[in-house]
Amino acid sequence: MSLFEVAVPELAVDLLTYESSEELKCGARVIVSVGKNLRTGFVIGKSEKILPSEIKIKPIEGIINDDFNSISDFDIFDLALWASKVSLCNIGTALKAFLPQPVITGEKIEPPPKLNEPERKFKEKNYFNPFDSERVNFYIEELNKNERTLILFPRKDDAKDFFNSLPDNLKTEALLLPSTGGKKLWVSWNLINAKKFRIVIGSQSAVFAPLKPQKIIIEDEANPSYIFHRTPEISARSLAGHRAVFLGAELILAGRMPSLKTFLRSKPIEKNFPERKNIIFADIYSSVKTEERGIKGSIPLTFSLLKRTKRELIQGNNVIWILDRLGESAEIFCDNCGQSIHCEKCGNVMRGEGNGNILFCKVCGSLKQLPEKCPYCGYKFFSGKRPGIEALEKIAKRFYKGFNIHIYNKKSLKSDLIKIKGLIISTQRALELLSDKKINPSLIAWLDLDFELNSLEYETRFKVFNMLMESYWKGREFNSERKVLIQSRHSGMKLGEFLLRGWSRFIPDELKERREFLLPPYGFIIEIECNDKITREKIIEVFTASGVFVMDSGEINMPLTININSLEVIAKILYKNFFKRNLFKIRVRSD
């Protein structure tokens, strides 16, 4: 009898130990007993633990498909093992995130065909070009090389647009992977596993496609949308890179600009720069006072913005105004006691929508009617703080009577905007419209770039610069004279100047600052979310006793933060002290 370590994806625990008389391969799916229930587990390897003789080890109850190759080739399993280490989560948690639910629950899978191919050596290539059409042509050239290719896009709509643009000979060999789970994804997964398609196209989740790719292309590789917002919170770009190394595949990192990690590693050369005449700086200090009734605060609208917008509207062009605040106001508060209305489910501040009569929580998505009176003091009158795009729409209608004005949000359809020219008011989501030739704005205005930079997150400046680059270059083939107007004070102006000088000047400046404070990519930021006071205190006590400083804001709904240059010490502390991790959530930030 041999002992084996088994990961059970549906449990928030580390590895469990079982015994079996059979020799089991790493990655084999097995049936194991957990409490009174039977679960599907994955064999991680033979156990090296020395257990006391009085401990009774349960046997493995059964084996599902003794040929491991029936489960998406070994590289997906290796990817889960690696991701669990670099994101400090359980291996089972990573497997659950990477594999379709039927694989996790033990459904039988047909083994894929054997691929007898010569061993390949990993290689990396960069292609940074701001013109979308030129990058698309480059990708099509790569797809024509008759290799199994996985190509990732940061947004599902971008993946769909690229798939639709493929010539017929490639489209018959390609599969557009569904962006959501369910039956469609399971059908697609099995087709890919059976190697029915040579090309797989999709957004971040496509990185787990069981294609065994010979080439992986990552479009817009610096885009933060590649980071998963579920455990393990890791970038699909990092996962694709590790997978390419394991398989000996070619990795092509592409986009308008490189990520910080790619710049550090390969020092790509920038060849295209924005034209000075197409970037306009407007100082917010010289703006018109624009306040909406019942809302504290104003939206800055400079004379330059108002004049240029009207000129473009008269000429029948589209104009986009970007203000990254949804709803009518960012916050609703009592006029008497000043207390903000908080969400009953998660405790976060709620924003006002629909003339302030509806309250929305942007954290958990809860909706409720504005209360008749303040829950703190009983007063009957409320006001809003920091106007959003719904208030901006009302203000814009006062300036541009007779012109079409639209809000573009989650409820909007791109097809509605194509039919009617006018002023489009939106958040940064409007950037996805730039790839549509029919919308083709002649002016894009950032109404308050300083607000975009207000976040205390370390990666804020890079994200905002990336969006500026996108607003200038995306769809520029349709209109080479499109203007980008930046309303700002000091910090936003400085970022706008970097836009003119290019990413080859901005990135070294950003890296210098991060190096000083040991921020990613030079170090790791670990966030531990825990709303249980006792567990939270234990986490602080255990890490502090091990010589690791934990930053605590004192707010129970805010994460504990650790800034460190190595994950090994953190992994050892977690493994030794926290066998069950269902009371807290760990996020490792390394990009």
Image (cartoon, rainbow, N blue to C red):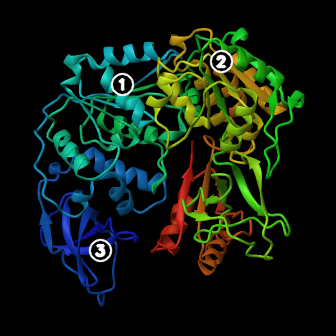
Query: What residue is shown at x 57% (from left), y 70% (from top)?
Result: 345
Which residue occupies the extreme front position in the image?
Answer: 402
Closest to the camera, between mark 3 and mark 2, is 2
**Circle 3 sits on which residue?**
17
Q: Secondary structure at mark 2?
A: helix
User: Which one is in front, 21 or 435?
Assistant: 435
The tag on residue 162 is 1
The tag on residue 339 is none
The reply to whether the C-beta atoms of the residues labelled 3 and 2 are less than 8 Å apart is no
Image vertical order of residue 305 relative to residue 337, above or below: above
Q: Secondary structure at mark 1?
A: helix
The mark nearer the N terminus, 1 or 3, is 3
- Cα distance between the residues tagged 3 and 2: 69 Å
Q: Position of residue 142 (x, y in %)?
A: 32, 18
Which residue occupies the extreme bottom position in the image?
Answer: 54
- Amino acid marked by disc 3: Thr
Closest to the camera, between mark 1 and mark 3, is 1
User: Which one is in front, 119 or 506?
Assistant: 506
On the question of residue 255 being in view, the answer is no
Q: Quadrant of the N terminus?
A: bottom left
**Circle 2 sits on which residue?**
313
- Amino acid marked by disc 2: Leu
